[in-house]
Amino acid sequence: MDIAPCKPAVWVNTSQGLTEAFQALDSQSRIAVDTESNSLFSYQEKVCLIQISSPETDFVFDPFEFSDLSLLGSLFQNPKQEKIFHASEYDLICLKRDYHFKFINIFDTMIASRILGAPQVGLGSLLQNYFDINLDKKYQRANWGLRPLPPEMLDYARLDTYYLFKLRDRLESELSNHELLDLAQEDFVNACKAAGHSNGNNQEAHWKLAGSGHADPRQVTILKELCTYRDEQARKADLPHFKVLSNDMLVEVSLHRPATLDELSLVPHFSEKLVKRHGSGLLKAVGRGENAPLVTRTKNPRPDDAFLARIDCLKNWRKNAAKKLEVESDVVLPREMMEHIASVNPATKSELKTAMCNSPIRYKKFGASILKELKKTEIS
């Protein structure tokens, strides 16, 4: 199907351009939205492009040129205008984090396709399957912070919103035919609640790198100091952590605990260039770790047997329910909701309705079955 763009995208980087784009978009009943960020190229990830399409025009906004993007924010929280995304969670997290936008009334084509049981839910796969469109993803990991942006990257960026209108309509039709539209709409509402996470660095990164099987507390303490050193260097260079020193390198240093540059040069993955650049700093970090108080990990208490029994029961139930609907298990009952229900252990319809207050559709569809399953775990 030939539905390629017939006119160029509009690059928006001036106040007048922003006003004109807003006026063109504000009158639309629905718009398509996407973003591009630079997590692979910067210490602090930030939104580098905001793409918004109407059925007539594709706009690409350069957020670096604006101190105030509240006009876009008014679009995003307009309840009468539908915002179409594909895989909205990451876009919403980034936009909320950087601009504190609020979102109302979205349609997420990835969520819709998952509810329909699509085996592959990437945008490229869906466009290929539904419309025989081959979406080239060669710039997926590009540096979107580049300025000026090459024309071919601009063309690439606009396609992620250009095709969403037709895809959205096809998916909505299938959801209606399978009587799953209400379930999708519930998930769209909940998707709007995605939190705008800080893009600060994880203070517990050393535990993640050490892994659950890391038994030596001194090595973990050294690893913590190594992570702190890497973070300092990444901040100074404005680079992501992995472009300074890899996780594997830090783990190897913590295991070998070198005290000299010669010993550091024998650690796997370390080239002469890296030893020259980071050797002194790494050895100082190892030294601090050797003498610092041992780090300890806070262990979560083991859930009681009754809770685990309820979890197993609900897992089996949702697996069977999902099989009947031909969808993934978490479409029937998301993991967080399942664990919350198992934790509060509702005994009545009213209690279950309260526990599922963010999912009234699922309560209506599955509430009676869930209560029935929970009763099977009661100890007589």
Image (tube, helix red, strand yellow):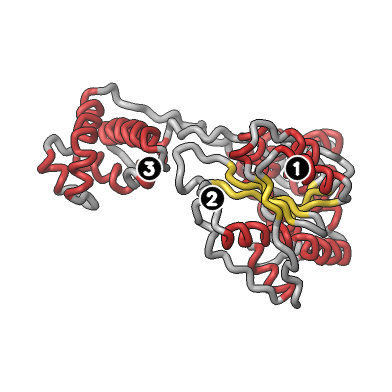
Q: Which residue is mark 3?
A: 209
Residue at x 30% of width, y 39% of height: 215
Closer to the chain start, of discs 1 and 2, is 2
Residue 362 vs 139, above or below: the answer is above
287 or 17, which is in the foreground? 17
* CA distance for labels 2 and 3: 37 Å
Quadrant including the C terminus: top right
Q: Mark 3 belongs to which amino acid?
A: Leu
Residue 292, horizontal then vertical, whole percent: 26, 23
The kind of residue on which mark 2 rests is Pro
Question: Which sits earlier in the primary sequence, circle 1 or circle 3?
Answer: 1
Q: Which residue is mark 1?
A: 190
Q: Position of residue 311 (x, y in %)?
A: 64, 45
Q: Nearer the viewer, residue 330 or 73?
A: 73
**Quick one: label 2 or label 3, which is nearer the N terminus?**
2
Report the residue marked by disc 2. 148
Q: Is residue 327 visible?
A: no
Instruction: Judge whether residue 7 can be spotted in this image.
Output: yes
Under circle 2, the secondary element is loop
